[in-house]
Amino acid sequence: MSYENAYAQRSDLLLPLSEQTPENLPFTVRIARDETAMEKAIAMRQSAYGRHVPEIAKNLGMPELHDNDPGSVVLLAESKFDGAPLGTMRIQTNMCGPLWLEQSVTLPDWLAGHALAEATRLGVASERTGRVAKTALFKAYFLFCVQAGIDWMVIAGRSPLDRQYEALMFQEVFPGQGFMPMRHAGNIPHRVLAFEVATAEKRWREGGHPLYQFVFKTHHPDIRIDGNLINIDALHRATTGEEALLQPQV
């Protein structure tokens, strides 16, 4: 499905293109579908983690199990100038099994039975373009979830990354519990936060969010993602209990 058709089909959640201002970026954001793109995403992932959590980075030089899940995609932000990787993020849905963070926590009842998508392995370049790429990757994450019929975006964020998601109006999944050790992430304490897709435009508009213009009022043709890679029917069958979910790997 094209970017334009995605807007047309989900007009209840996104503004029509006629109400958006076109803007080109100095990079593209796409799904890493081939070996070369995946190698760039993995190199970016390892480099970014090496700056902040080197003990985890040393094990990130190869593809991970969830990179190839049928319910997952890996995003790559790539420079138009020289093709260098500027950022990456993995999006894992609960189409084929529990989210990665569910190895460490049991999600509350209000998220049960919903289509969920967890962002993991976010990493961006250290220069200014990397900061812009991070914002574009979040927009790509949101657009993917809209197209894939996701109800809630969910993340486990270590400090200080948790504050960035809080600023995006993610809410606490476990109010009052704060940071919890995550066994799937080397027991580093994380906060679990969630973002409701269906109400995003209204909440950001009414709250005067500083990124509202970028996400909802600007058309970025360089963000080239397709949530229809996910089998929406299978996703909703899984989340409503019509088919068995795989157990999380320990």
Image (cartoon, rainbow, N blue to C red):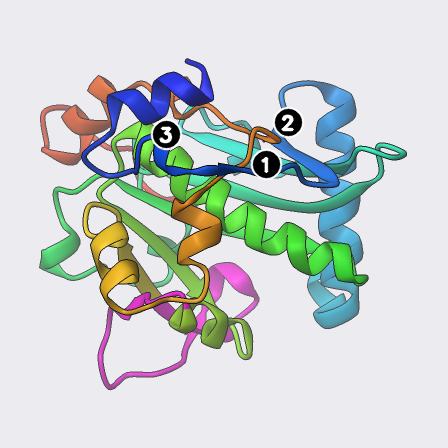
Compared to 145, does 87 lie above or below? below
Q: Which mark is residue 16?
A: none
Please state the horizontal and vertical placement of residue 82, each as a whole percent of the image: 90, 34
Residue 171 as seen in the image, left or right of residue 223: left
Compared to 171, does 97 lie above or below? above
Residue 226 as seen in the image, left or right of residue 220: left
Q: Which mark is residue 18?
A: 3
CA gap between label 1 and label 3 equals 27 Å
What residue appears at the point 46 percent right and 32 percent down from the top-left corner?
72
Please state the horizontal and vertical placement of residue 250, each as a whole percent of the image: 43, 50
Compared to 184, does 28 lie above or below? above
Q: Which residues are magenta?
A: 168-192
Please state the horizontal and vertical placement of residue 120, each as a whole percent of the image: 51, 51
In the foreground, 172 or 164: 164
As helix, strand or loop, the secondary structure at mark 2 comes to loop
Q: Is residue 61 magenta?
A: no
Residue 34 as seen in the image, left or right of residue 3: right
Q: Amino acid at mark 3?
A: Ser
Compared to 78, does 171 lie above or below? below
Mark 2, residue position: 32
As helix, strand or loop, the secondary structure at mark 1 comes to strand
What residue appears at the point 40 percent right and 65 percent down from the top-left corner?
168
Q: Earlier in the sequence, mark 1 or mark 3?
A: 3
Mark 1, residue position: 75
Proximity of marks 1 and 2: CB atoms separated by less than 8 Å? yes
Q: Earlier in the sequence, mark 1 or mark 2?
A: 2
